[in-house]
Image (spheres, rainbow, N blue to C red):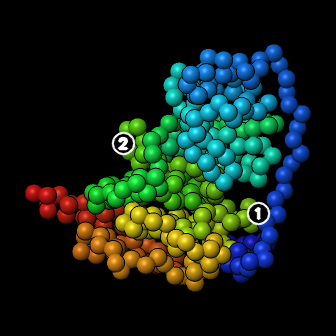
């Protein structure tokens, strides 16, 4: 059983008067050497893709980053992801300010660097300095979030993505890590056409009872028990994966248009997104499956092995219909 959490549950504190207190460290004196930031971009005036080989990356984490020279791939709560060159190849470079609250997530990103699975984004390096932290990752294509905003996806694609992320989570849980922020924005389409789970900044270790209280995840995707102040578990990931499966069908975020506090309140009460107008293309079996995964009672949710077996049956049905 989890130890009592320090701090007050977000679920119990839902109020328009809530204020967020941020603690930041004082910036340290930049380290100087003969290489200037201009040198880093000297050969990239035409293409705004910068080099993060040594000694360039050392200069970036020690002195900072010229933001006017960039190709932005995405923005998160604590960092920005850019396109860069590393050892002659294009990569994704996530840059986090070292005095940012998000620097606490760097430790789990470093742990995730040891994960090796075809459906998990590969983290190549984590470099920390007094000014910035640089996380170098394999370069992927669009996020599932962006894809859903642009167009609908086929039922075969829905099954494939659900299977892929379920396999990624099964591997993570086996390795003792809970992702804790499964959502379409954190699913990237790899250059090998494989969906990949990304961003382990909110991740926690399985059965770790000694981390300080903090909200893990994103409102609308976080499980009811997490909203009420408990630490994320593998079953919390399964809840979030079910919301993702729903969104692949609805193409909109859960509880779209509602205030964050309202979303947290509804989730804490066990209320899930509406889906009665949605046609899943499987005579309701697709919807039945994700509903069994977002049960308010976490111990009644399906496990990943069962989910994968049921998804395989749906996949076989697609094949039979096509012939």
For disc 2, the neighbor class at 10 Å (few under 14, some 14 to 19, many from 20) is few
Residue on which disc 2 sits: 193
Comparing 251 with 284, the one in front is 251
Numbered disc in front, either 2 or 1? 2
Q: Are marks 2 and 1 in contact (CB under 8 Å)?
A: no
Comparing 133 with 143, the one in front is 143
Q: Residue at point 42% right, 45% down?
A: 189
Where 205 falls versus 46 (above or below)? below
Furthest residue toward bottom: 269
Q: Kindly report the distance in space between the C-alpha atoms of the residues bearing marks 2 and 1.
A: 38 Å
Q: Picture quarter containing residue 130? A: top right
Marker disc for residue 122 = none
Quadrant placement of the C terminus: bottom left
Residue on which disc 1 sits: 212
Comparing 252 with 234, the one in front is 252
Q: Earlier in the sequence, mark 2 or mark 1?
A: 2
For disc 1, the neighbor class at 10 Å (few under 14, some 14 to 19, many from 20) is few
Q: Picture quarter containing residue 6? A: bottom right
> Can residue 30 be seen here?
yes
Q: Picture quarter containing residue 47? A: top right
Q: Residue at point 64% right, 44% down?
A: 80
> Can residue 136 be seen here?
no
What secondary structure is found at the residue carrying circle 2? loop
Q: Position of residue 17 (x, y in %)?
A: 78, 77
Q: Residue at point 52% right, 82% down?
A: 271
Q: Position of residue 255 (x, y in %)?
A: 52, 73
Q: Position of residue 30 (x, y in %)?
A: 86, 31
What secondary structure is found at the residue carrying circle 1? loop
Q: Position of residue 109 (x, y in %)?
A: 63, 46
């Amino acid at each position: 059983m989890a130890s009592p959490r320090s701090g007050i549950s977000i679920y119990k504190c839902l109020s328009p008067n809530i204020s967020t207190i941020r603690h930041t460290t004082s910036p340290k004196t930049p380290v100087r050497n003969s290489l200037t930031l201009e040198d880093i971009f000297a050969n990239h005036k035409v293409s705004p893709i910068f080099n993060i080989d040594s000694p360039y990356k050392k200069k970036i984490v020690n002195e900072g980053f010229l933001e006017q020279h960039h190709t932005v791939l995405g923005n998160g709560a604590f960092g920005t992801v850019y396109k860069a060159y590393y050892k002659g190849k294009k990569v994704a470079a996530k840059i986090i300010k070292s005095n940012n609250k998000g620097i606490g997530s760097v430790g789990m990103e470093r742990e995730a660097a040891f994960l090796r699975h075809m459906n998990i984004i590969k983290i190549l390096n984590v470099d920390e300095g007094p000014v910035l932290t640089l996380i170098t990752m394999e370069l992927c294509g669009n996020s599932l979030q962006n894809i859903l905003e642009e167009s609908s996806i086929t039922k075969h694609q829905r099954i494939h993505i659900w299977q892929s992320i379920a396999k990624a989570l099964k591997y993570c849980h086996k390795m003792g890590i809970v992702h804790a922020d499964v959502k379409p924005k954190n699913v990237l389409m790899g250059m090998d056409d494989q969906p990949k789970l990304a961003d382990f900044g909110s991740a926690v270790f399985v059965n770790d009872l000694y981390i300080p209280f903090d909200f893990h995840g994103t409102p609308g995707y976080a499980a009811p028990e997490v909203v009420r102040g408990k630490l994320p578990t593998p079953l919390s990931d399964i809840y979030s994966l079910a919301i993702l499966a729903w969104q692949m069908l609805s193409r909109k975020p859960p509880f779209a248009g509602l205030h964050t506090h309202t979303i947290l309140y509804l989730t804490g009460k066990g209320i899930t997104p509406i889906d009665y107008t949605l046609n899943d293309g499987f005579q309701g079996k697709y919807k039945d499956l994700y509903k069994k995964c977002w049960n308010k009672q976490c111990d009644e949710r399906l496990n990943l092995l069962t989910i994968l077996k049921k998804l395989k049956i749906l996949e076989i049905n697609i094949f039979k219909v096509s012939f």
